C-alpha cells in the first residue's frame, strides 16, 4: 500500500512537499492560518505545515515513531518548505512557469504507468484530491525548471574535461569490455556524467546564494508550539524571526 502511494506521488517530490500554499495572500487570523514561514508575499501557514507533516508521517516505520524522530522530521520539513518557497519566488522573479501543455504531458506520463482506474483509486485511498496532486505536480515541475535554467548557465564542459574524465574513469576499462561503445557514445556518456557532477557541485552554492538574497522570516512562537524542544535548533537557512 505504501509503495503505491510513493509511486503515485513520486513526480511531485518528497512526500513531505504535499501541501498547498493556502495561506498565500490571506490574513494571519483563523484556526491554523497563522503564518509560519514568509518569503516576500508568499507564506506557509501552520495549517499547511501540519497537513504536510501528517502525510509525511506515512513514510515513517512504525518502530521509529519516537519523539526524537518526529522532531527531526519536523525540522527537516521546515527546511524543505523554506527551500520550496525560495524556488517559487525565484521562478516568479525570472519569469518561469509551467504551461498547460507541459502539465498535461507530465500528467499523461505519470498515468501511463497505471492500469485504468488505479491512479485515481490510489489518490482516494490516501485522501489526496486530484486537484491537489495536479497542483503539486505543477509546483514540482516549476522548481525543476528553475534549477535547470539557473544551473545550466554555470556548467561549462571543455574538451580537456572530457579527456581527463576518460583518463581517470574509462581508459583501460573499455579495452577489457567485450562491447565497446562508439567514440560518440562515449563522449555523450561522459558529458552527461560531467554535467550531473558539476550541477551537484554548483547546487549548494547557488541555493545558499538564494537564501542570502531573499528575506526569510520564521514565526518562532508558532514554531515552538510545533517543534517543542527542537524549536531552538538552527534551520539550514539563516532565517529571521517574525
Image (cartoon, grey):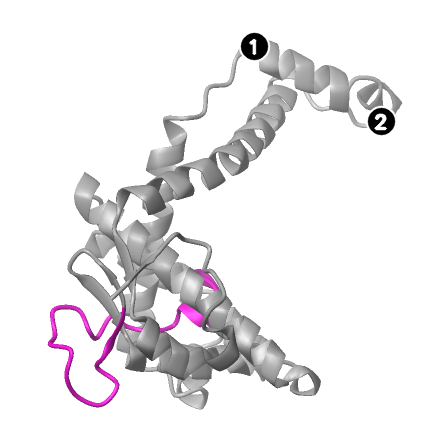
Q: Where 77 falls versus 46 (above or below)?
A: above
How many marks the image carries: the answer is 2
Question: Does the magenta run of residues contain 58?
Answer: no
- At x 52%, y 81%, the residue is 57
Regarding mark 2 in the picture, which secondary structure is present there?
A: loop
What span is in magenta? 9-36
Label drawn at residue 177: 2
Q: Main structural element of the magenta stretch: helix, strand or loop?
A: loop
The quarter holding residue 47 reads: bottom left
Q: Is residue 35 magenta?
A: yes
In this view, the residue in front, 122 or 205, is 205
Let me know if residue 12 appears in the view: no
Give the left or right position of residue 85, taking residue 113 as reference: left
Q: Please state which of residues 55 and 37 is positioned toward the viewer in this rendering.
A: 37
Q: Upstream in the sequence, badge 1 or badge 2?
A: 1
Residue at the image point whose x is 52% and y is 12% from the top? 158
Disc 1 from disc 2: Cα separation? 24 Å
Q: Residue at x 21, y 75 (%)?
A: 22
Tag in front: 1 or 2? 1
Cβ atoms at labels 1 and 2 below 8 Å apart: no
Q: Could you say where residue 173 lies in the image, as x and y percent from the top left?
A: 83, 24
Residue 154 can be seen in this image: yes
Query: Relative to residue 210, is residue 167 drawn left or right?
Result: right
Q: Quadrant of residue 136?
A: bottom left
Residue located beneath label 1 in the image: 159
Amino acid at each position: 500500500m505504501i509503495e503505491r502511494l510513493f509511486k503515485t506521488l513520486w513526480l511531485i517530490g518528497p512526500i513531505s512537499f504535499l501541501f498547498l500554499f493556502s495561506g498565500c495572500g490571506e490574513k494571519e487570523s483563523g484556526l491554523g492560518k497563522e503564518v509560519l514561514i514568509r518569503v516576500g508575499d508568499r507564506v506557509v501557514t501552520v495549517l499547511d505545515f501540519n497537513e504536510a507533516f501528517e502525510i509525511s508521517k506515512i513514510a515513517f516505520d512504525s518502530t521509529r515513531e519516537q519523539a526524537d524522530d518526529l522532531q527531526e522530521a519536523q525540522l527537516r520539513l521546515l527546511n524543505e518548505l523554506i527551500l520550496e518557497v525560495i524556488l517559487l519566488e525565484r521562478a516568479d522573479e525570472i519569469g518561469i512557469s509551467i504551461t498547460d501543455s507541459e502539465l498535461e504531458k507530465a500528467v499523461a506520463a505519470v498515468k501511463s504507468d497505471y492500469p485504468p482506474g488505479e491512479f485515481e483509486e490510489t489518490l482516494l485511498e490516501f485522501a489526496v484530491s486530484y486537484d491537489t496532486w495536479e497542483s503539486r505536480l505543477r509546483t514540482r515541475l516549476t522548481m525543476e525548471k528553475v534549477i535547470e535554467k539557473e544551473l545550466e548557465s554555470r556548467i561549462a564542459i571543455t574538451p580537456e574535461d572530457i579527456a581527463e574524465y576518460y583518463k581517470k574513469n574509462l581508459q583501460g576499462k573499455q579495452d577489457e569490455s567485450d562491447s565497446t561503445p562508439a567514440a560518440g557514445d562515449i563522449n555523450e556518456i561522459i558529458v552527461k556524467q560531467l554535467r550531473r557532477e558539476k550541477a551537484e557541485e554548483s547546487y549548494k552554492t547557488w541555493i545558499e546564494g538564494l537564501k542570502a538574497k531573499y528575506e526569510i522570516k520564521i514565526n518562532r512562537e508558532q514554531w515552538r508550539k510545533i517543534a517543542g524542544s527542537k524549536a531552538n535548533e538552527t534551520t539550514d537557512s539563516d532565517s529571521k524571526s517574525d
